[in-house]
Image (tube, grey):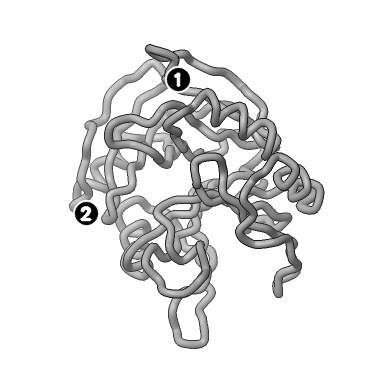
Amino acid sequence: MTRPTDLFCVLRYENAPAAIDWLEKAFGFTREFVVPGDDGEIAFAALRLGDDVLGTGTVRPDVKHAICVYVEDPDAHCARARAQGVEITQDVSEEEHGRIYVCKDLDGHVWSFGTTFLKESPGCDLFPVVGYKDTEAAIRFLKDAFGIEERMLVRNEDGSIGHSELGIGYGVIMPTHSNQPGDNPWAQIDFGAYACVDDPAAHYERAKAAGAEIVRDLKAEDYGASTYSVRDCEGNLWSFGDYRPEGSRP
């Protein structure tokens, strides 16, 4: 039997029905299910890409993105987070989809920990990229408060963090900068996503044909992967490539 993927990200849109159509056309997502909301809104939807799932729906008052993590013991995990001074916005409770609690990290990003998972899967293909004002402090926080392990840390020549990967089970989070100068869009974001695809060149052509805004053309990276970066229909930043983070498969 396969196990839960451990982590999935939720990215909500102002016009969720149009965004779902666009994500299917431009990026090749397929619908797992869609739960209608009021007045044409979408309460929640699950979109599949490869073996992974993106949660989405209409933007809520204070939530545009979130990271949902599977843990076997939400009560113990919540106690650990609370002891580290984490802001708990919803105590552990039984929901239709599992036992969960909700909290915010040091830069206000929303996290949900619990027994919820959307579908058993052999691993993750979709990885949240989370921007922080102080990436060094964020990595310490994620390790101490949430028990997420450091798997990769690449530093620039000046000692600053160029790339980082933290993991929990098969899930991988990529903390990055939200306030760095320069023309690198990945150093100036609040939230984005990286997706592993088998054929980045074909995926690039599909997105381009759909009219997506390409912000970094497809290229071979120094570490051997092929990647490109693109904005979706509401300006969220994505990267697609054939690099696979360590630990995202059995």
Q: Amino acid at mark 2?
A: Gln
Around disc 1, counting alpha carbons within 10 Å, would you say few (fewer than 14), some (14 to 19), or many (20 or more)?
Answer: many
Q: Residue 133 placed where, x, y %?
A: 32, 65
Q: Is residue 116 above or below residue 246?
A: above
For residue 84, the mark is 2
Q: Is residue 170 visible from the viewing direction of this image?
A: no
SS at mark 2? loop
Q: Residue 245 placed where, x, y %?
A: 62, 57
CA distance for labels 1 and 2: 35 Å
Q: Is residue 107 visible from the viewing direction of this image?
A: yes
Residue found at x 45% / y 63%: 176
Q: Residue 247 placed where, x, y %?
A: 61, 54
Which residue position holds label 1?
Answer: 42
Question: Foreground: 242 or 88?
Answer: 242
Of marks 1 and 2, which one's residue comes earlier in the chain?
1
SS at mark 1? strand
Q: Amino acid at mark 1?
A: Ile
Farthest bottom residue?
158
Question: Foreground: 48 or 124?
Answer: 48
Q: Residue 48 placed where, x, y %?
A: 63, 31
Q: Quadrant of residue 23?
A: top right
